[in-house]
Every structure is written in C-alpha cells, then in structure tokens.
Amino acid sequence: MVGSNGPRALVVGMGIAGLTTALRLHEIGWSPVLLERSQQRRMGGYFIGLFPTGVSAAERLGVLGAIGDRTHREATTYDISRSGRKRPGLGFGDIPGSPRLILRGDVEAALYAAAGSVSEQRFGSTPVEIVEHPDGVEVTIRTTTTDGEVTETTEHFDLVVGADGVRSTVRRLRFGPDEDYLSSMNHIAAATILQSPAAGYTASDGLVLAEPGRALWVFPFVNHLPGVMMSYRTSDEASELRLRPVDALRRAFGPAPLGPVLTDVLDQFDASDDVLFDSTHQVVMPRWHSDRTVLVGDAAWCLTLFSAMGASSALAGGDYLGSALQRNAGNTPRALREWEGRMRPFVDQLQKVGRKDITMFVPQTRRDKLNRTVLQSVFGTPWGKQLARRAFADKPDDPRSIDIAAA
C-alpha cells in the first residue's frame, strides 16, 4: 500500500464505484481506506455493458486497456421461441450507444490492480456507527476475521463514501432505512455464465426469448463462454426470493413446456456456483450527501439491469467526485454540492430510461411483444442495424453517450 499525508477518506464497498472512487481520491492527494464486508474480493461476475460514459471515465483513470472488450463482432443474435422457431434479431450490442460487452469482474479486476497499491484495504469489515461533525466523521468499524474473531475500532475520517450497493449500510446509518429509498421494479433478475453454449447453438450465437412478463437473453463473448440473463415480472418479490432460485425460474417460465433452450439454460444455472438471483429496485433519494458523507453508484441511484448503465454511471460518479473535491480543496461540503449538482440530472435521465426500456428486455404485454416483433423485422437485418446506428449518431444528447465526468 502507498499512503499519503492528504485528507483521509473511508470508502465502503470494493465494487466498481468504491474502487473508482479510491483510485481517483488517491490521484488528487487523498488517503483512501477501503472496507469490504466479505472476507475476500469478489471474482467473476455476470455480463455488463460499458457505454461511452463509462469508456471515457475508464480511459481517464488509465484502466480502459486492462478492462478490455469482449464484444463478439461476428456474433449473430436470434430471436427464438421455446418451440424452436428462430429468426434474425437484435442483440445487446445493437442497442443505442453500441456498448462494449464485458464481465463485471473485468472492470473490478482492472480497478483493483490500479487502486490496490495506492489504498489500504480491510476485508471482513463494515461500519456500525457514523457520527458526523463539522471537522470530520467518527466511524466505528467492526471487523470479523476468518477465524470469527470480532473487534471494533473508532477512527476519524475527513470523508465517508458509501459505495456499498443497493442495500447500503452507509445509507441506512446516515440517511435512513432501505424502505425509504428502494423503488421496486416488480421483477426478479437472474444471471450467470454458461458452462457450454445453449442447446442447439454455438458460443458465437446470441439468443433472445421474450414473452409477456418474462425473458431470457444469452450474450456471446470473444474467447469466453456465453452469459445469460433471465427476468420475470412478479407482484411479490419477497416470496420469490424465499424459493430456490432455479425452482422460482422454472415456475416463472412455466407451465408451458420449456423447450430445449430453456431446459438446458436452467439446468446450467442450477449447476453454477456463481449466480445472481435478486429483486430489482431503483434507489430514489432526495439527496445523496450530507456535509461529509456521500453515496456513489448503486447505493445512491441503483439503475437496475434494465438501464444497462450501472457500471458506466459508477465509473463516472467516482471519477467526477475526485474532480469536484480537487476543485474545492478544503471545502468538502461545497465539493459534494457541486458533484451532486452535475450528477443528479444525468442520473434522473438514466432512471427514466431504465423504467422505459424495461419493455425492451421484458415485454410486459402482448402489444409489447408485437411491437418487439415488428422492430426485430425492421432492425434485425444487417441494413436495419446500420440504419439504427446512423439514427443514434444523430442523437448525441442520449445520456448513455454523455461524458458527464469530464472536468
């Protein structure tokens, strides 16, 4: 670890938002301390898209090359039915913004390689009390070793950054309970990496099986096995989460016969050691900061998988936080006001996109399904995809293309 004599920041969470923030704080002369509840760093992870917003931030941070690009340029995406029908379709890489298709672990590994040597990391640690005063923040930190030994210490910091996800501990301690800020999307999302291509298809084939209220997407990568995302609508997320994930998915995609692709993908999901199965919530707050505590990424504004901008907004948020603090050196409250003043309109747009674009991932009605079929017939062909890209090029104000963190 490389330390500094600058202001001391506690960054809670070692995901994309936390690692980005720690790296950026070090660049401007701060001394970041990273806390992670788990006993070790998270590895692997499901697919994500990196849009121009995130690409620009990653390039400034010097990690874009290490993140890489797993987009399969020669892939073919098919719109399929469970009975076996297939036709040319639109894949994730065809949506506006032409995102890079990567794994969450690609971003976290690149950021950790850069931030790990310039920050202090403490695993098995979480804040249990945060007391803010005009000159700083006193934080009581509970640490549990791999042997189960528990210790608590209270330390002084100049800033606390909550980058600890949608169910943020920092947010609960400083701003109130989860239920005050979690806005349900009434969907369950599931994701994993397949161990072999879906039945009847190759590793370079993308698949979309979309039915009213439920959908399966398979994403091909370069030099990597495909990823899969499944989602379905529910009015009772809590009950779904009490079920074994694969049982909930089989029930959600029933009672009709699953067909070969769904059967195979669900069997692979059941056999995987690394899966996502969770409810989907946006985090909606009137304010993301106090004078010396700030929330970044999902803890502040979770966008859900349906916006596809979670990683990009986390990179941009952490990057610009460093710029605001650097410009307002010695006046942290003013820096946080400036930071939120720029980020909030951008995030508000993205949350609207997420609520609107849910029908692109999961058609909600038969009409949505029909509209999707029409769009596939128009834009699923090579010339249609070129037309869509040209149309997007004429809309530089799309939030997914904005370099919001540019200083």
Image: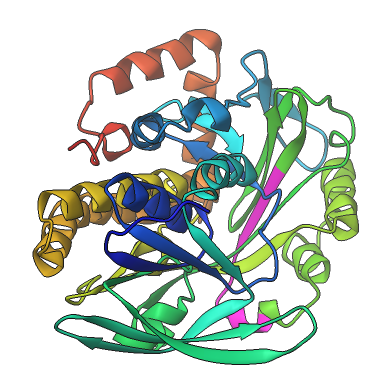
Residue 46 vertical position relative to residue 251 in the rendered view, above or below:
above
| Left or right side of 156 for 280 | right
Q: Which residue lies furthest to the front in this view?
A: 5
Say if residue 322 shows up in the picture.
Answer: yes
Which residue is found at the position 25% from the left and 70% from the top?
Answer: 288
| Left or right side of 301 for 15 | right
Quarter of the image for the C terminus: give it: top left
Stretch of the chain drawn in magenta? 228-239
Seen from the viewer's position, the closer of residues 375 and 326 is: 326
Measuring from the top left, give residue 126's x and y in whole percent.
53, 80
Measuring from the top left, give residue 321's x and y in whole percent.
25, 53
Determine which quarter of the picture holds residue 175.
bottom left
Residue 189 vertical position relative to residue 114 in the rendered view, above or below:
below
| Left or right side of 239 for 199 | right
Q: Which residue lies furthest to the top in this view?
A: 383
Which residue is found at the position 68% from the left and 27% from the top?
Answer: 78
Measuring from the top left, give residue 41's x and y in whole percent.
66, 59
Determine which quarter of the picture holds residue 325.
bottom left
Seen from the viewer's position, the closer of residues 246 and 404 is: 404
Q: Does the magenta run of residues contain 301?
A: no
